[in-house]
Amino acid sequence: MKKINKKYLVLCGCVLVLLAIIIGFIIGIIHRHNSLFASPEQLTNSYLKSYIKEDSSILKKIEYPFEDTLNSSQEQRFKEIMKKQYRNMVYTIEEQNLEEVDGQIVVHVTVFDLKDSYDRANHYVESHASNFEKEDGSFDEEKAIDYKLSQLEDVKEKIDYSITFHFIKNKDNQWNMSDLSSSDIEKINGLF
C-alpha cells in the first residue's frame, strides 16, 4: 500500500475549500443579480407573500384603525386577527401593462371583510348600549371592545378588491415598486 503524502492531503483540502468559496461567491452574485433585476411581477409576488408569510416588517406596522382605545391584551388579539387575515389572503395577478420605463400590475385580492364586521359590531354596541354597562350603570368600554374584537375574530365573509401596483425603472434599469396608497393597504387589511 502506497503511503499518501501529508502535504498532498493538505493541498487537496485547501483546493477544495477554495473551490467551495468560489462556488459560493458565484451563487451569491447570481442571486444578487436576480434580486436586483426582479421583474414587476416578481416584486408584486414578493410584496404580497410578505403578508401571507407574516413577515416581521409587515407585522410591526399593524395598527388598530378605529377610535377605540385598546389595552395590551386587546392589541394582541387584534394582531392575531390581522395575522389570520394575511394567512388567508388570496391574490391573482389580473393584468400587466409594462412600458419601457414604467408600468402597472393589477392584482385581485380576496380578504376577510373586517370593515363590514366592525361596522355591524359597532352599530350593535351603539344600539344595545345597556348590554355594555357596568354595575354602576356607566358604559363599559372594555366589554364593548371585547365584543367588537370577537366579531372580527369570527368573521367568515370575504370581499374582493383590485389593487394597482405602480413601477418605475431607475437609472440602473431596475424596476422599483411605488409605495401603495393607504386605501390600497386598507384593502389588503380588509378594512377599506
Image (spheres, rainbow, N blue to C red):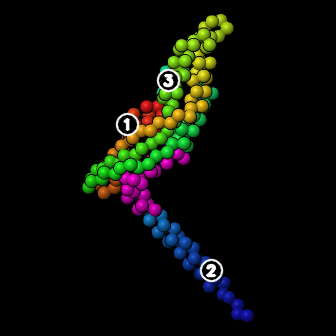
- Spot occupied by residue 3 in the image (x, y as percentages of width and height): 70, 90
- Amino acid found under the numbered disc labelled 3: Asp
- In this rendering, the answer to whether 104 lies above or below 11 is above
In the rendered structure, find residue 119 and report the number of the disc placed on it.
3
- Describe the element under mark 2 as helix, strand or loop: helix
Q: Residue furthest top?
A: 136
- Amino acid found under the numbered disc labelled 1: Ser
Q: Earlier in the sequence, mark 2 or mark 3?
A: 2
- Describe the element under mark 3 as helix, strand or loop: helix
Q: Earlier in the sequence, mark 3 or mark 1?
A: 3
Residue that label 1 marks: 181
Q: Residue furthest bottom?
A: 1
Where residue 146 sits, quadrant-wise, is: top right
Q: Earlier in the sequence, mark 1 or mark 2?
A: 2
Q: What span is in magenta? A: 31-54
Question: Which quarter of the image is occupied by the C terminus?
Answer: top left
Residue that label 2 marks: 10
Q: Residues within 10 Å of mark 3 (few under 14, many from 20)?
A: few
